[in-house]
Image (cartoon, grey):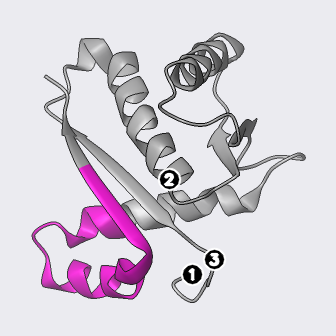
């Protein structure tokens, strides 16, 4: 994965999340993630599909990001499944990167796992209070 020459690994970590405001936290993290992807020149991003109503909330948030010019109209975003008959196994890559980032916190072994990704890794941490 680290040898993927066109790869950009964007990780946005939200801290201090109030569990009753999980959707708000998701929107804030998604805004930051899509902004970084757009700035990196990414033209297509895939988001793991959820329920129809939650996908609609994500779609509305993305439209708002475009209206507010947080992201450009150039970036195309779609919803995909990580498993099943119409799945996209590449959707597993973000989980692998997130796992490596999570393992790296407070662990020398975790830092070693993360090291190959460092040249293409863009990490942000945002407070969600």
Q: Position of residue 127 (x, y in %)?
A: 16, 34
Residue 112 higher or lower than 56, as above or below: below
Asked if residue 115 is among those painted magenta in the image, a careful observer would answer yes
Neighbours of disc 2 within 10 Å: few (<14), some (14-19), many (20+): some
Q: Position of residue 129 (x, y in %)?
A: 13, 22
Q: Compute the Cα span from label 1 to label 3.
A: 11 Å
Q: Quadrant of the N terminus?
A: bottom right
Q: Counting residues from the N terminus, which is met first, the one under dot 1 or under dot 3? A: 1
Q: Label 2: which residue?
A: 39
Residue 100 higher or lower than 32, as above or below: below
Front of the two marks 2 and 3? 2
Q: Which mark is residue 1?
A: 1
Q: Residue at x 58, y 13 (%)?
A: 57
Segment tinted magenta in the rendering: 100-124
Where disc 3 sits, the SS reads loop
Q: Residue at x 19, y 20 (%)?
A: 18
Q: Position of residue 107 (x, y in %)?
A: 14, 76
Q: Counting residues from the N terminus, which is met first, the one under dot 2 or under dot 1? A: 1
Q: Counting residues from the N terminus, which is met first, the one under dot 2 or under dot 3? A: 3
Residue 8 higher or lower than 38, as above or below: below
Q: Label 3: which residue?
A: 6
Query: Looking at the rendering, which quadrant does residue 41 occupy?
Result: bottom right
Q: Position of residue 48 (x, y in %)?
A: 63, 40
Q: Are marks 2 and 3 in contact (CB under 8 Å)?
A: no
């Amino acid at each position: 994965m680290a040898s993927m020459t066109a790869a950009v690994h964007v990780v946005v970590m939200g801290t201090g999340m109030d569990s009753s405001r999980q959707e708000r936290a998701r929107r804030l993290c998604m805004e930051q993630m899509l902004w970084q992807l757009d700035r990196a020149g990414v033209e297509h991003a895939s988001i793991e599909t959820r329920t129809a109503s939650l996908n609609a909330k994500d779609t509305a948030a993305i439209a708002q990001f475009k209206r507010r010019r947080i992201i450009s109209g150039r970036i195309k975003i779609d919803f995909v499944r990580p498993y099943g008959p119409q799945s996209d196994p590449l959707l597993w890559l973000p989980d692998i990167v997130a796992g490596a980032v999570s393992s790296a916190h407070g662990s020398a072994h975790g830092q070693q796992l993360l090291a190959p990704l460092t040249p293409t890794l863009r990490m942000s941490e945002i407070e969600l209070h």
